[in-house]
Amino acid sequence: MARQLDLDLVEVAPLANPPVCRIMDYGKFRYEESQKAKESRKKTIHVSIKEVKLRPKIGKGDLDTKVRHMQEFLSEGHKVKVTLQFRGREMAHPELGSRLLDTVIAQVDGLGKVETQARLEGRNMTMVLAPEKKAPVKKERTPSEAKSSDADVPATEVLAAETLVAEAPDTPAEQSDPPS
């Protein structure tokens, strides 16, 4: 029957009891399956881990810059691994590192949460921050974007606004004749 219609007999569900077969064009079936697989791959979210390295004696300005980068990474949906590197005698005071990481957590509050608590591994203290599951932040429109979106306003609204301006009463300064 399939040969008469110039189609193929395709086993669709081999694990079903009894197995399910269909008469169809096998090439078209394979193409549609590959398109479904491609679409499902597009919908997956690729989360990468960005690493930011700090030192216990980091300056305030440098720390602010690093925290700004962390906030940017978190807002883009990336995880951030914060690595605090100790050298020499700095190993004697791991509490300084813990305090520094606490300030980092306080500054990225709202954008990210601690996924892995800070732990000391050799000469490094590491912590992983994950992005919050909130709605993405809307960015402000630039003037060029505002102009292009204003062009999308229906003509009836533009006419109504022009009519209101035309019907507005004149101000007293305009009603009186200027002194000669």
Image: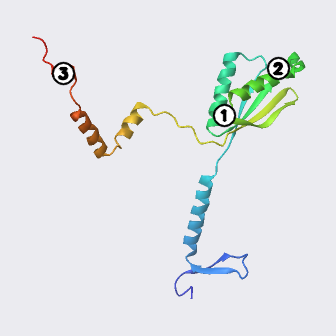
- Cα separation, mark 3 vs mark 1, equals 54 Å
Residue 178 in picture, x, y percent from top left: 13, 15
Q: In the displayed image of the protein, which residue is found farthest to the right?
A: 92
- Rendered image coloring scheme: rainbow
The first of marks 2 and 3 along the sequence is 2
Amino acid type, callout 1: Gly
Quarter of the figure with residue 113: top right
Which quadrant of the rendered structure holds the N terminus?
bottom right
Measured in 3D between alpha carbons, the distance from the residue under mark 2 to the one under mark 3, in whole angstroms, is 71 Å
Tell me the residue that label 1 is attached to: 110
Pointers 3 and 1 in contact (C-beta within 8 Å): no
Indicate which disc residue 19 carries: none
Q: Position of residue 69 (x, y in %)?
A: 64, 28
The residue nearer to you, when weighing 19 against 60, is 60
For badge 3, the amino acid type reads: Glu
Please state which of residues 154 and 166 is positioned toward the viewer in this rendering: 166
